[in-house]
Amino acid sequence: MGHGTPDNMNWAGLLQKLLIVVHIRQIICSSLQFSVPEEMEPDTLVGSLSKNFSPPYQLLTHNYLRMDINKGNFYTTELKMDREAICPAETKAEECVTLYNAIVGPSKELIQFSVIIEDINDNAPHFENNKIHLGVPEDTTVGTSFLLDTQALDSDSGPNGEVQYHLKGSDGAFGLKIEEDSSLIMLVVQRALDRETRDLFQMQLVATDCGVDPLSVSAALIVTMTDVNDNCPAFSSDSPHSVTIPGDSQKNTVVTQVRATDPDLGPNGDIVYSFSPKVSERAKKLFSLDSLTGSISLTQDLESDNSEELVLKVLASGHHCPPADTQVTISVLPKANQELTIKIRFIAEHQNQTMVLQENQHPTALAVLELEGDSSFKDLFLAIEGEVPFTLSPQNGKYLLSTSKPLDYEMNREHHISVIARVKSAEGSVIVPSRRVVTVLVADINDNAPYFVQPHYELQVEENNQPGMSLLQISASDADSGDNGLVTYRLENYNPTMFSIDSVTGQLSLLVPLDREQQHVHRLTVFARDSGSPPLESMATVSIHVRDQNDNAPVFLTPHFIFFIPENVPTLSQVGRVEVKDPDKGENGTTELHVVNSSAPFVVDNTQGMLRTTRNLDRETEDRYELYLLASDHGQTVALTSTARVTIFVEDINDNQPKVILPSTNSSCLTVSPGTLAGATVGKIYAIDEDSGLNSEITYSATAPEPLQNSSPFQIDSRSGNITLSQQLLHEDLGMHHLFIVVRDGGKPVPLYTTVWMNLLVNDSTEPCHLDQVPTWTGTLNLVQTPSKAPICDVETARFSQLMLLIGLGMMLVSTCLFVATVICCLKQRSRSLKMNKGAYTEANEIPLKLKDKYYSD
Ligand SMILES: *[C@@H]1O[C@H](CO)[C@@H](O)[C@H](O)[C@H]1NC(C)=O
Ligand SMILES: *[C@@H]1O[C@H](CO)[C@@H](O)[C@H](O)[C@H]1NC(C)=O
Ligand SMILES: *[C@@H]1O[C@H](CO)[C@@H](O)[C@H](O)[C@H]1NC(C)=O
Ligand SMILES: *[C@@H]1O[C@H](CO)[C@@H](O)[C@H](O)[C@H]1NC(C)=O
Ligand SMILES: *[C@@H]1O[C@H](CO)[C@@H](O)[C@H](O)[C@H]1NC(C)=O
Ligand SMILES: *[C@@H]1O[C@H](CO)[C@@H](O)[C@H](O)[C@H]1NC(C)=O
């Protein structure tokens, strides 16, 4: 498509039309108005386009608003709207309007809407100048106003930006007047001012805006009163009115001084004194007046023999003031014809008019004074000048000088008593025609004990100190003088080899190293004594605390601990207490024990100082342990240690039952020749026990079939286990004998035991003995206590009950067969013993050999 074609023209016209429509639309839509207060939080809803347009909605500028594309709601953003920043020019009530463009609707229409940013009172007024100095003349008339060269501005608009002023701290002396356009602030004087009453007002000029929550600011307003000469001199009430002077007063003697005051400042307060023109010529000739100081003095020697009265009228004038006046009457006394003298007759001892008195004495009379001279002075009397501890009491025209209270040397060593003659005149004025000075020296007596400023000294010394160390200087002062105040020091209640004090300087020193473990605090008493007579003494105490050093290693109660512990005790059983002591203090004396260098099953329980086992002990494996303990303290720099040896013997307990070695099994069997001689050893039981002592002492006893001692031909030696033939074997003894042997150890309280069968075959045959079946024990298990009451063996043909029955039946036949049986028995016994004796001699040597074979072949 080229330029200038009709098609092209059509497109351009369409576009133009569209723009016009858009423009119109824009104008219509700009009536769409929203408003939002400034400084709103982000995401505050400002308004919505959804009522007017359909979605989607798209904002073209994103400065302060963000649009919800689908809902048409728009919100504030992180960037806060500050009305004062957006519309800086519009300080007053005009609206701050911002315009926004948006594209809305499916057809993407361009619209415009406005958002009015409403003012909030977020700015306080502020003064351009927050300290205002103003000088106001004190004579300013009420109602006068002064322009204050300041103004408060508030950048908010409307009432929020309107400023009102008020004054604080004026105490009603000042008010404010604001000119119409608010830009001029006037300070109005509301009350008469007086610099002499108050020369400074520190006020605050407060500016407050008119917002709903008003904000305010204040500026300091300092008003100083400037002085105007509004006061005139006035004579003070203590200005003298009358003076008496002696007739022989010298030239330049200052007679008196008048005084007037003017409270004004600087030159306004200057006073000039002058004589009134009404003063007599003689007075003017005799007296001069210092115009600045107001002192009146004699212009010439007054050689007057007559009494005379001169009246001086003095004026005090200030600038622009009518002069104030006062009147001074000067009475001139006639010149004395004769010198007045004060005669002194000393009572107390004196030298060169000087008396020496001891301190602390009761009031004493010192001297009698008398006034001698012209008797025309009727009203003369003697008096002491100043405050001294002396009195002068008149007595018959004389005066007695005495002390008024005990003198104190320490307060004042020398008193000069100035005695003067005074005149009682109507106005109480004084002339001094004569004066005598009496000197009293005070002699010290020892009335002050030495005084310790610090009555108790406290110090710390580390032990093991250097000998000869100085500790501290003790000092006591004595207010007395000379020997009375000479202090010497000494110690009491102390060990002279340990401490010493320099009697003159009070330097306390330590002669030997201290040992805290011996004594941790030393208390000394120091006496300070002066050298008066009698001497006075006072006391101070010194506490010396010895600080610890880690100078003691731990010490075991014994260098070698020996403990016994039974075997088989549970783990962590107590073996024994391993006590260790360290006399040092705190950590330096806190000890900890370890088992060193040992795999022995022991550990130290440091909380109790107890040695404990760490596993089960078996005496049969190891019956004795040796180990070393290391004790170390917790000294900070160096820990001190010591060791102790520990030997632990494991005591046996009866934990092993005897083990039978011979016979080797329950089915072992021995053949005994019937011809064996009584007393011959036919066999042996041998057992061992791994325990020690009594626990391994073995005894043997046989229990079956009946107590061997009575009927069995065999008996067992309980110690050796030898089985011997107790009697010659009879014919009925042929066959198998089962002996139930209990092998017991000597354990207390309950011995352990093993049982074994000893089988003996009595037969001639040389064939090896053979046992088909091991016999079984049917008795109770109470074998240990009562072996002799053993029950009957299973393999025996006759049981005990059956035997009893047979005995019962036999008893019925006893009475009838008693004689016959006795005769037959006697005959049989005799024939058998003869037969057996013959065989025993032949076979006695062979049986032990057979026995041997039997034992060792099994
Ligand atoms: C006494 O006083 C005079 C004059 O003050 C002096 O010269 C003299 O030494 C004094 N005598 C004694 C003993 O103090
Ligand atoms: C322990 O001894 C050290 C010096 O050996 C000392 O510095 C420390 O103060 C002592 N500790 C205590 C608690 O006395
Ligand atoms: C520690 O063991 C070593 C070697 O095993 C030995 O030389 C030393 O004497 C042992 N020390 C103690 C205290 O038993
Ligand atoms: C036990 O018998 C053996 C020989 O068999 C003998 O040497 C020993 O002395 C006997 N012991 C006792 C206590 O009779
Ligand atoms: C003795 O032994 C022989 C041969 O072994 C046997 O025949 C005989 O019965 C036995 N005598 C007794 C009383 O057991
Ligand atoms: C032998 O017999 C006794 C009693 O029946 C039994 O307690 C023991 O254990 C037996 N000994 C052997 C080695 O079999």
Image (spheres, helix red, strand yellow):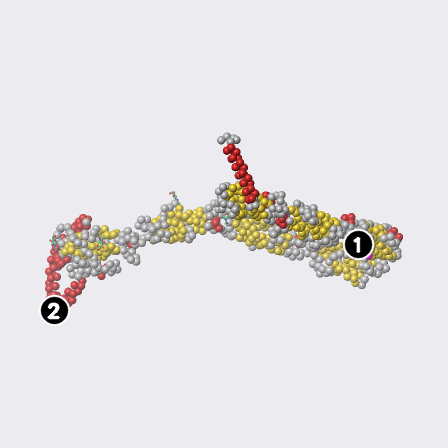
Up/down of 374 relative to 86, above or below: below
Q: Which residues are magenta?
A: 231-241
* Picture residue at 12% right of the left edge, 52% below the top: 765
Q: Earlier in the sequence, mark 1 or mark 2?
A: 1
- Residue 624 in picture, x, y percent from top left: 34, 49
Classify mark 2: residues with Cα within 10 Å, few (<14), some (14-19) or many (20+): few
Q: Position of residue 446 (x, y in %)?
A: 67, 56
Residue 408 visible to the viewer: yes
Q: Which residue is mark 2?
A: 816
Q: Amino acid at mark 1?
A: Ala
Quadrant holding ligand 5?
bottom left
Q: The residue under label 2 is which amino acid type?
A: Thr
Q: Between residues 210 and 399, which one lies in front from this camera angle?
A: 210
Residue 516 is situated, as x and y percent measured from the top left of the image, at: 51, 50
Q: Secondary structure at mark 2?
A: helix
Pointer 1: what residue? 234
Tell which residue pokes out farthest to the top in this image. 2
Queried on whether the Cβ of the residue with tag 2 lies below 8 angstroms from ligand 5, the answer reads no
Residue 495 visible? The answer is no
* The one of 432 and 843 positioned closer to us in this rendering: 432
Q: Give me the residue at 58% from left, 47% from top.
A: 118
Question: How many marks are shown on the rendered structure?
Answer: 2
Q: What residue is at 77 percent from the left and 61 percent from the top?
A: 393
Residue 726 disc label: none
Per the model, the C-alpha gap separating discs 1 and 2 is 177 Å
